[in-house]
Each structure stands twice: as structure tokens, then as C-alpha cells.
């Protein structure tokens, strides 16, 4: 939107690195370092921080006149009530269904609390001027809610260009990465099986590690590289690899800078997405499609919304099947290469930057028409 001339204030948590985006001013609430990092999924820390997000939002609305407010996830709950007071148009950026999140992340079993979130979510869907969803499952969810087609847009997060870190934070981020990975160290004469992403339980890293012995029975020169994860997560999965006698065939990098993660992926002979379940499409899938490298992914709904057998090797979410898929991708008969070529064309036709930009332009057209 900024590239299309929209001037924006982006309000966010104190944690993180600033990025340089022309036309965007980044505003952060206090960091509260003593409370620890903000983790994926619902948490009491997020609820605490959202109190400050609300206060800062009201302050910004009192000082500035905004044409629209682009509310991400739970921030739409209070923006829905601020909308009639301040008269802005509301964009609901729906990356997940929040009642589902409460269940999926085992935050609560309270049916009453989940019902409250469902009512709030339904109200937000009704009053929003534009609703953006990021995967077909969420798009179907919105359609079932009865919202008009005109104000709903499915816009996959399919653009993966490098983040432009601002000067001071770029140096700080470089220093924080140096302890994890001083330089890119790739094992020689090995074919790399690379996973890059978070190490949350639903990502299926245990399935991936347990699949490796079968892969090594067929391809002795393979090595698994797992990029990402906290220290605790890396220690957990490294122990699993050790218990299976895989120390010499696994490498865990922990969290690294985006550029380093991309280099690992670019050096891969096969990319993997072993997710064990879920409904939201992993964002890394789009970059994997465009990479020109064979992709092995589990046949779960979060993948099959985007992937099919013409662009990836799809397997059951269990070690034996995943191992067989990786073995097929590593074979030298050209099957994996053909799928990778198909995948790149598929990405260009459906998810590339020109496609993404056109969807954003359509959102802005609707918002402009609301003002007329």
C-alpha cells in the first residue's frame, strides 16, 4: 500500500526490529523486556500488551485524521468499537479465526470464553469495510458468515522479498545473530534436506527427524538442516536426533538472520514442510514454490489449499511416508526437478508480485468508493 502512495502509521509491539518503508512511520509501545519474548499464538502477555496498543491507538486517533485503520488479528476487537466514534473505515486483516486459535493453541477450554470471542469476531466481520483473509480456509469461513463478496479479499502472503532493516537495528540484529551462526557453514559433498521456519509442535519437526534414518538407508550423502527455533526448541529436537543416532547427519542453526536462512534454503537439494496439521497455509510455502527446488510437504489441509501433486511431493504426516517422499525428491530421474519447474510457473501465474499488487489495488478501490 505504501508503494501505491498510502501514508501510514504502523503501531506495533516494542519487540522487534524496525524496517525502512517509504511512507510508513513505525510506532512502538514500550518493550517490557522483563516479561520475555512474545510467543506465537494466544497468551496473557499479548493481552497485557494489547492494553497499551489500545491506549496508543486512541492517542493516535485523537491527534490524527485517518482515512482507514488496518487492524490485524485481535486489534480489530477494539477498533470495531472505535470506528463509529472516530469515523474511520475499517480493514480487518484476518490471519486466523481467533476462536479457533484459543482451541488450537490450548489457551482455554472455556466454552463461554470461546463463544464471546466468536460473537466479537462475527460483529467485526459485519462492521468492517474490507476483510482480508490469507488462505482459502479463512476465505471460506468468511463466506459462511454471510459477508458480501464485494468487501472480502483473499490475499495470500506470497511476497517474500528481503526485509529492509533500518540502520541501527540492522547492526543490532547482526550482532544478535552472530552467536548462533558466525558464518554460513555448509557440509561438503552432502545433499541438503532443509527445513526453515518456527519449531512449534504443529510444524512436525519430530516427524521429519524420525524420517531421517529411512532416508539415510537409501541416500548416505544426505544431511538434514533445521533452520530456526528458540534455544529450548533446538535443544529438544537435537536430543531427539541424538537418541536416534543422527548427530552426524543433522544440523540445527537456531534463529538466524533472514539472509542466512535464505542461503541455507538456496543450497538445498530438497525443501521440506512436514507440518502435522492445521488450516492456515504456511507462508514459507510460497517462497518454496518459486525456488526451483523440489518440495516435499505433508498432505494436510494447510498445504493442500495451495499445493497439489503437480507442484510438490505430497505425503502422509508420518515418518515412513515423509522419508519416501524425500527419497523420491533426491532421486536423479528428474521427477523432483520437473515438479520444481511446474511449481515455479504455478507461483508466477497465481502468487507473484504483480498478482499481489493487483489485489491490493482492488482493496484500495473499495476503500476509496466507501468515501464517495
Image (tube, rainbow, N blue to C red):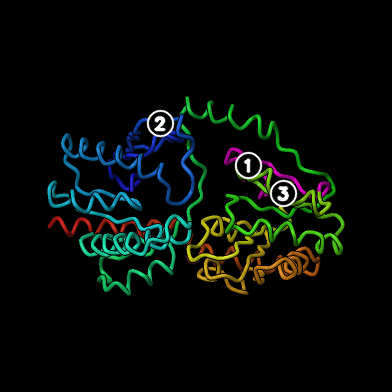
Q: Pointer 2: residues within 10 angstroms few (<14), some, or many (20+)?
A: some
Which mark, residue 31? Answer: 2
Q: Which residue is mark 1?
A: 232
**Residue 89 spot, x, y in % from top left:** 19, 53
Is the Cβ of the residue at disc 3 closer than 8 Å to that at disc 1? no
Q: Nearer the viewer, mark 3 or mark 2?
A: 2
Q: Pointer 1: residues within 10 angstroms few (<14), some, or many (20+)?
A: few
Per the image, label 3 sits on a secondary structure element best described as: strand
236 w.r.t. 29: above or below: below
Q: Which residue is mark 3?
A: 225
Residue displayed at 19% across by 52% down: 81
Q: Quadrant of residue 35?
A: top left
* Magenta stretch encompasses residue 259: yes
**Residue 283 spot, x, y in % from top left:** 51, 56
**Residue 192 spot, x, y in % from top left:** 75, 52
Apparent side of residue 204 relative to residue 47 in the rendered image (left or right) = right
* Magenta stretch encompasses residue 135: no
Per the image, label 1 sits on a secondary structure element best described as: helix
Q: Nearer the viewer, mark 3 or mark 1?
A: 1
Q: Between residue 94 and residue 266, name the one nearer to us.
A: 94
Q: CA distance from mark 1 to mark 2?
A: 22 Å
Give the magenta range.
Answer: 247-266
Image quarter (top left, top right, bottom left or bottom right) of the C terminus:
bottom left
Residue displayed at 66% across by 62% down: 295
Q: CA distance from mark 3 to mark 1?
A: 17 Å
Amino acid at each position: 500500500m505504501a508503494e501505491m502512495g498510502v501514508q501510514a502509521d504502523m503501531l506495533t509491539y516494542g519487540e522487534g526490529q524496525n524496517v525502512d518503508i517509504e511512507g510508513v512511520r513505525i510506532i512502538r509501545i514500550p518493550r517490557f523486556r522483563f516479561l520475555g519474548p512474545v510467543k506465537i499464538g494466544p497468551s496473557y502477555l499479548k493481552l497485557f500488551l494489547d492494553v497499551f496498543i489500545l491506549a496508543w491507538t486512541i492517542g493516535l486517533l485523537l491527534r490524527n485524521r485517518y482515512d482507514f485503520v488496518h487492524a490485524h488479528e485481535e486489534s480489530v476487537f477494539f477498533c470495531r468499537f472505535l470506528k463509529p466514534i472516530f469515523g474511520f473505515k475499517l480493514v480487518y486483516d484476518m490471519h486466523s479465526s481467533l476462536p479457533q486459535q484459543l482451541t488450537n493453541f490450548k489457551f482455554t477450554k472455556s466454552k463461554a470464553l470461546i463463544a464471546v470471542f466468536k460473537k466479537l469476531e462475527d460483529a467485526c466481520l459485519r462492521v468492517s469495510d474490507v476483510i482480508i483473509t490469507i488462505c482459502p480456509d479463512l476465505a471460506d469461513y468468511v463466506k459462511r458468515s454471510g459477508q458480501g463478496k464485494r468487501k472480502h479479499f483473499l490475499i495470500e502472503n506470497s511476497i517474500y522479498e528481503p526485509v529492509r532493516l533500518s540502520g541501527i537495528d540492522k547492526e543490532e540484529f547482526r550482532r544478535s545473530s552472530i552467536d548462533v551462526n558466525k558464518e554460513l557453514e555448509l557440509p561438503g559433498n552432502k545433499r541438503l534436506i532443509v527445513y526453515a521456519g518456527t519449531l512449534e509442535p504443529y510444524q512436525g519437526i519430530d516427524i521429519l527427524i524420525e524420517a531421517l534414518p529411512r532416508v539415510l538407508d537409501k541416500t548416505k550423502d544426505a544431511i538434514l538442516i533445521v533452520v530456526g527455533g528458540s534455544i529450548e526448541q533446538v535443544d529438544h529436537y537435537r536430543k531427539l536426533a541424538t537418541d536416534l543416532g543422527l548427530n552426524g547427519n543433522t544440523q540445527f542453526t537456531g534463529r538466524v538472520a533472514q539472509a542466512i536462512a535464505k542461503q541455507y534454503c538456496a543450497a538445498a537439494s530438497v525443501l521440506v514442510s512436514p507440518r502435522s496439521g492445521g488450516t492456515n497455509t504456511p507462508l514459507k510455502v510460497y517462497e518454496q514454490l518459486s525456488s526451483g527446488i523440489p518440495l516435499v510437504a505433508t498432505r494436510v489441509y494447510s498445504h493442500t489449499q495451495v499445493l497439489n501433486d503437480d507442484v510438490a511431493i505430497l505425503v502422509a504426516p508420518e515418518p515412513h511416508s515423509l522419508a519416501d517422499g524425500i527419497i523420491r525428491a533426491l532421486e536423479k530421474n528428474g521427477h523432483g526437478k520437473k515438479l520444481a519447474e511446474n511449481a515455479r510457473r504455478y507461483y508466477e501465474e497465481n502468487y507473484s508480485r504483480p498478482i499481489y499488487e493487483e489485489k491490493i489495488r482492488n482493496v484500495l478501490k473499495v476503500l476509496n468508493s466507501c468515501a464517495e
